[in-house]
Image: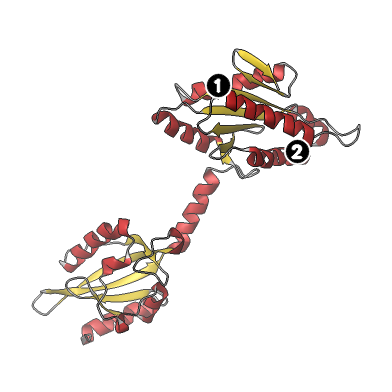
Amino acid sequence: MGLNDVDGRLLRGLIEESAGDIVVRLDHRGFIVHASANIAQLGLDVEAALLLPHITDLAARDHAGLVAEHVGAALAGRALGGWVEFPVAACEGHGACHDPRCQRWYALSLKPLAGEDGTPEGALGLMRSVQHLRSLEGELHARAITDPLTGLANRHAFCASLRRHLAEGGGQQLAVLAVDSMRALLLRYGQRTADEVLWGFAKFLETMALPGCELAQLDGERFGVLLPEVSGRRAREWAEEVITTFAALAAPVSPRAPQLTASAGLARVECTVDWTLREAELGLVLARAGGGGQVAVAGCRRAA
């Protein structure tokens, strides 16, 4: 299907204005009857297609309705204005692939076309990649919920996870762990050494974590570990193993090197986020009050 002179001038103008974008021409039903060569980056060749693809076919399944609403308004001559954003499966398996790693985000803007009698005849569309914006948003979100030193989730993200578990009934075991005497270590060896110790302890916890554990750095020296569906006894056994193993690995290699130990407090996830964290942190206080290198539960202390 060819373009008339008016459509052709508009199409050329769009191409000149937005080199690198994808320009599409839709018929009155929303099928793509023409597209610029850049549509090949989506794995499509409209000219060679036996059946014309519909514009909504480009969108991921969970965004097809949103695109259909936007396109329907434009084809009816009542464009909603602005852009609609949706992910496109940009790979060879375009029609059947739903792998998020293959998805690329695009924004679509449509301009209705009408015949001389005012009857809607379709629309011209401009598809512009917004993948870099989506990637940036994802990176900013990741930074907002991640501790920059250790790469673990921060307190805000951890508390959000606790709220979700509580909404589902709770019952999990929570451990709050910390390297003992971090303040003294900081004053004696400086911030760089303290950061290295915290980073190393975080990586150690990652290797000791049970399958399904969630880890976070709660503040400058305390770490939270949300254990999967295990009993309180199993949680204590795991925490004691962590404390004992860390003490062995951190044993000083010379008399002048510091002796590093860690302590842990345990609590059951129940009531509220604040209550759960307070109970686990109180257990940590009790463990440290006993000289460190211990595991304790509020109201009941147990040496590792």
Q: Residue at x 29, y 75 (%)?
A: 24
Residue at figure coordinates x 67%, y 32% from the top left: 221
44 versus 274 height, above or below:
below
Disc assigned to residue 191: 2
The spot of residue 124 in percent (x, y) is 26, 74
Nearest to the observer: residue 129 or residue 204: 204
Occupied quadrant, residue 13: bottom left
Q: Quadrant location of residue 175?
A: top right
Residue type at mark 2: give it: Gln
Percent coordinates x, y for residue 96 in the rendering: 35, 66
Q: Identify the disc placed on residue 240.
A: none
| Residue type, label 1 | Arg
The image quarter in which residue 287 lies = top right
Q: Residue furthest left?
A: 117
| Quadrant holding the N terminus | bottom left
Mark 1 Cα-neighbour bin, 10 Å: few <14, some 14–19, many ≥20: some
Residue nearer the viewer, 203 or 128:
203
**Spot occupied by residue 296 in the image (x, y as percentages of width and height):** 64, 19
**Which type of secondary structure does the marked residue at label 2 adopt?**
helix
Q: CA distance from mark 1 to mark 2?
A: 27 Å
Q: Secondary structure at mark 1?
A: helix
Looking at the image, do the residues carrying marks 1 and 2 touch, with CB atoms under 8 Å apart?
no
The residue that disc 1 covers is 278
Identify the residue shown where x is 53% and y is 42%: 145
Q: Is residue 38 rendered to the left or right of residue 116?
A: right
Residue 225 horizontal/vertical position (percent): 58, 33
The disc, 1 or 2, on the residue closer to the chain's N-terminal end is 2
